[in-house]
Amino acid sequence: MPLPGQASGGWTESSSALRILNVGIRNSLAPLTDDAFTQANPVAVATGVSSRLDITLNGVLSGSVCFTRPLDGNQFVGGPGTDDIQTLYRANTIQQCYRPLGLFINTATGNPYENLPGVASGVGPYVSGMGTYGSSLYETALIAGGGDPLIDTGDSILTSYITGNELIASRNGFLMPKWILNAAGTDLVTHDLQAVTAQSFVMSADSSSTTIGIIKMAPDTVQTEVVWDQRI
């Protein structure tokens, strides 16, 4: 618990959505794209917006996915890009080089009453090279179609955050499950991946997304974080 005057008490006294449990590599060997500081959130698809997202924040967010952005120049990284940017990658032969690298540790534009190292340096550190992490930022609904919920609330037709499931990156640059348990509860099926995940959209091919991690602890109505072992 916070003592008076110390902190707001945000998750474990941190303003970051990403919680480092066992760190792999804190990687800062890449400059951020310009839109990493200016992008609106959600950045690409404005339907099925995650309930874990503060839509008033601009720029890449703590706990969001860091992507290679080769069309912006050598070594640049950033968020997934707007719908227009993702469409440019889709039409370019360089599309296979659009890939996730890890998760951003901090929000690029910083937070009120904090120093702003990202703005000052133009660099946004991200975690790569395995490790175990928790995050309070992730997709809570499919961002296309009917916006079906992804977390079991007791009456959900879908449930997908399950221990052992894979995590991939949505078109808005947030973690989402790769497999969704269908309403019959009998098997795991892809669910319009091309429309909702960044790499599948860019590659025009379902199931082409890089596995970011394996779920260890699934979020629910009581436990609001997703915890995973990272694979990139």
Image (spheres, rainbow, N blue to C red):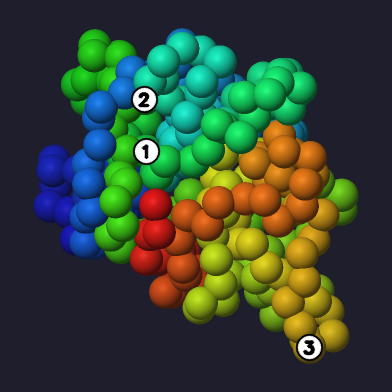
Query: Can the viewer see residue 12 in this picture?
Result: no
Q: Amino acid at mark 2?
A: Ala
Q: CA distance from mark 2 to mark 3?
A: 42 Å
Estimate the x, y position of residue 23 in percent, counting from the top left: 21, 55
Residue 87 falls in which quadrant of the image? Answer: top right
Estimate the x, y position of residue 81 in percent, counting from the top left: 60, 25
Q: Nearer the viewer, residue 107 or 155?
A: 107
Residue 132 falls left or right of residue 100: left
> Which residue was labeled with disc 1?
104
Q: Residue at x 86, y 53 (%)?
A: 146
| Label located before the other in sequence (3 or 1) | 1
Residue 189 falls in which quadrant of the image? Answer: bottom right
Q: Amino acid at mark 1?
A: Phe
Residue 186: mark in rendering: 3
Q: CA distance from mark 1 to mark 2?
A: 9 Å
Q: CA distance from mark 3 to mark 1?
A: 35 Å
- Relative to 174, is 156 above or below? below
Query: Can the viewer see residue 26 in this picture?
Result: yes
Q: Are marks 1 and 2 in contact (CB under 8 Å)?
A: yes
Q: Amino acid at mark 3?
A: Thr
- Relative to 197, is 115 above or below? above
Q: Residues within 10 Å of mark 2 (few under 14, many from 20)?
A: many
Residue sitting farthest toward the bottom: 186
> Which residue was labeled with disc 2?
108
Q: Residue at x 73, y 27 (%)?
A: 90
Element on which disc 1 rests: strand
Q: Nearer the viewer, residue 17 or 8?
A: 17
Residue 145 falls left or right of residue 115: right
Estimate the x, y position of residue 88 in percent, counting from the top left: 71, 19
Which of the two marks, 2 or 3, is nearer to us in this view?
3
Element on which disc 3 rests: loop
Estimate the x, y position of residue 52 in percent, counting from the top left: 54, 49
